[in-house]
Amino acid sequence: MELTPVTDLPEIRPGDDLAELIAERAGDDLESGDVLTVASTVVSKAEGRVADLEEYPVSARAQEIADTIGDLTEEEKDPRFAQAVLEESTELLIDCPFLLTETRFGHINVNAGIDQSNVPGHDLLLLPKRPTKSAERIREGLAEHGYDDIAVIVTDTCGRPFRHGQRGVAIGWAGMPASRDWRGEMDRDGDELEVTVQSVIDELASAANLVTGEGADGVPAVVVSDWEFGDLEGSNELFRSVEDDLVRQALREWDWKGGA
Amino acid sequence: MELTPVTDLPEIRPGDDLAELIAERAGDDLESGDVLTVASTVVSKAEGRVADLEEYPVSARAQEIADTIGDLTEEEKDPRFAQAVLEESTELLIDCPFLLTETRFGHINVNAGIDQSNVPGHDLLLLPKRPTKSAERIREGLAEHGYDDIAVIVTDTCGRPFRHGQRGVAIGWAGMPASRDWRGEMDRDGDELEVTVQSVIDELASAANLVTGEGADGVPAVVVSDWEFGDLEGSNELFRSVEDDLVRQALREWDWKGGA
């Protein structure tokens, strides 16, 4: 398996055709059957998902959230930012000491994944509205530029329970399943494997994040070549529902009380 | 970045020298400065971390856990298995409808990561006792066989909240930090990045898991080449403490009551 960054992409602006910009630079590195990962930041920029704090008139709930976090953490929280997070979300999983929410497309991230850095001329960069649709558009655009059958993954980075640090994850995908289903497969000894479903799009997003970097020389698109999904069954489930997630159930019954 | 599986490793037996077996097969694929990932299953086998259920006399707590899970899920649970999980763990985070525990070295996984497949001649394969020590030994062994300065990561696969499926994670490492610390770094526009710490060892473990496979043709060791940690500060924190983890705090106050 090989990962090759797509270099020299310009700063992306609203309306830019990402597929075209990538196709112009990928050259022979990108071939039919490859996977292309694209960071959600540039997808959002191309889709004009920028916003300013003044666009978010503060609701009572947002004011309450900002006040509570401010009181407990002793750091001022802009209630307009809390309002923006609420408007991007369908459920608040944690409302203090930080906001952990489910976005409208099912992804769970701090602050609904809204970025306050990396957005020239505006206050906020929102996640793409429907990242799987974005991935499909990029896939179709690549085909129009001569790159047939490229699987596309839109990536984000986020933290997680139990382990420190952030890692790359997939939030949208097209041209491949989300997971490999190993159920019923046998191990070397002919015993059925305990592993069930392998989230390959998340693993691809994590792998790509190792070569993208985050800083001034960040490369938002990466080609994954010499890798195959293989013959296993695929699944397109990525985001857990509350019924499938004991941690979400536990968080619904819990309030942070200021420390462990 | 390139990932190359180390092929033709034999079935690993207690006492096998993994560094030697890998060194004999890696050839020119492995070079100074590369990262080598090794699946915990083969590390455990080499270290003799196999066990049989009859070695676990059942405590009252294990019996209670097995009975409760059995009643609620209507699937019989062997109390000796529950006992084995308890003995490998320092804390039970979830005790029903499945066991999620913190192992003695800080890793959180279902059933303390004990594997009931993939272990010829025994009932159970336990995780390595101290995976970072295991990684250090493999790193030293590789140096003795002429492979200097190879970073070694011992990997596991596990599920997670919020997202379906399992992905590769690191449980032990040597020769490199666990994370890149981006705090204070600037983005393209000269603004400070919001991202804080990137868990590169987990991302490397996920990347490797894409090429190892799980089944009869599984390859437990992978060379990562043409990748550099870079000039950023490193951190060796991987496992969150309860104080740093709101989900762990929420789980301490919560009991599963049979559904959402």
Image (spheres, coloured by chain):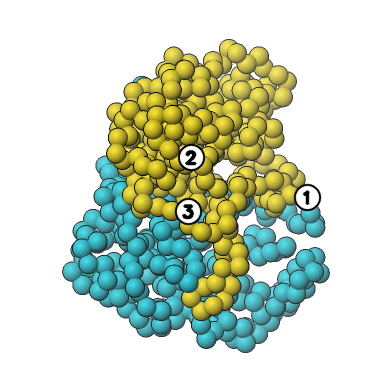
Chain colours: A yellow, B cyan
Task: Please give the residue where the numbered disc 1 appears in the rendered image.
Answer: B260
Secondary structure state at the residue bearing disc 3: loop
* Amino acid found under the numbered disc labelled 3: Phe
Q: Position of residue A161 (x, y in %)?
A: 56, 49
* Amino acid found under the numbered disc labelled 2: Ile
The chain to which mark 2 is attached is A
Image position of A61 with respect to B62: above or below: above
Q: Residue at x 57, y 53 (%)?
A: A234
Image position of A219 with respect to B258: above or below: above
Say whether marks 3 and 1 touch (CB < 8 Å). Answer: no
Task: Please give the residue where the numbered disc 2 appears in the rendered image.
Answer: A153
* Cα separation between marks 1 and 2: 31 Å
Image position of B145 with respect to A126: above or below: below
Q: Residue at x 26, y 42 (%)?
A: B231
Label placed on residue A116: none
**Residue in front for this viewpoint, B57 or B151:** B151
Task: Please give the residue where the numbered disc 3 appears in the rendered image.
Answer: A229
Q: Position of residue B141 (x, y in %)?
A: 26, 72
Q: Residue at x 66, y 27 (%)?
A: A86
* Amino acid found under the numbered disc labelled 1: Ala
Residue A179 in view here: yes
Residue with the most extreme left position:
B146
Image position of A86 with respect to B10: above or below: above
Q: Residues within 10 Å of mark 1 (few under 14, many from 20)?
A: few
* Cα separation between marks 3 and 1: 34 Å
Mark nearer the N terminus (3 vs 2): 2
Instruction: Say which quarter of the image contains residue A119.
Output: top left
* Cα separation between marks 3 and 2: 14 Å
**Residue in front for this viewpoint, A56 or B36:** B36
Q: Residue at x 42, y 46 (%)?
A: A33
Q: Is residue A150 left or right of residue B124?
A: left
